[in-house]
Amino acid sequence: MKTILVVEDVSVSRRILVSTLLPRGYEVAQASEGRAAIRLLTSDDTIAAALIDLGLPDISGEVIMRWIRRRERNEGAKRIPIVAITGYTDEKKHLSAMQSGADDVFVKPIMPHQLLGWLEGALS
């Protein structure tokens, strides 16, 4: 089973993502803030992909994504596909997420088929 990291501070949104992933056989690691996500990424090498909200209470999702990509480059960590999750429809925000390391950006509300299709392609 592949583990997906879900980083989302809004509990309802986090539960929706988790309830989309679990029935498809994914394991889920969850964090409601950025620092907790970094601790999980540091301690759990089974994480295969990450869904990261851009607007977190402690540090931005963009900071987490840059940390992940820097770790991959500098420490040889395995590459993790990243989806930035946001309520923003602003193209500048999406571009900033992509420049920070996101492979894609999904605007809330996320359609389950969109997320599952993306993960299937990214993890195959």
Image (tube, rainbow, N blue to C red):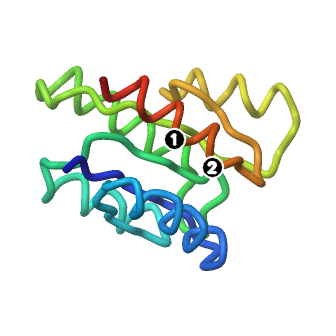
Residue 77 sits in quarter = top left
- Of residues 64 and 112, the one nearer the viewer is 112
From what the image shows, is residue 71 above or below residue 54? above
Farthest-out residue, bottom: 11
| Residue 13 image point, x, y percent | 65, 68
Residue at point 23%, 33% (across, down): 71
Asked if labels 1 and 2 touch by Cβ distance under 8 angstroms, the answer is: yes
Q: Residue 116 shows which numbered tag? A: 1
Left or right, 28 with respect to 77, comes to: right
Quadrant of image for the C terminus:
top left
Left or right, 83 with respect to 86, comes to: left
Residue at point 71%, 47% (across, down): 111
| Residue 117 image point, x, y percent | 53, 33
Q: Residue 66 shows which numbered tag? A: none
Residue at point 81%, 26% (across, down): 92
Task: Judge the density around disc 1: few (<14), some (14-19), many (≥20) Cα neighbours within 10 Å.
Answer: some
SS state under label 2: helix
Q: Residue 112 shows which numbered tag? A: 2
From what the image shows, is residue 88 above or below residue 101? below
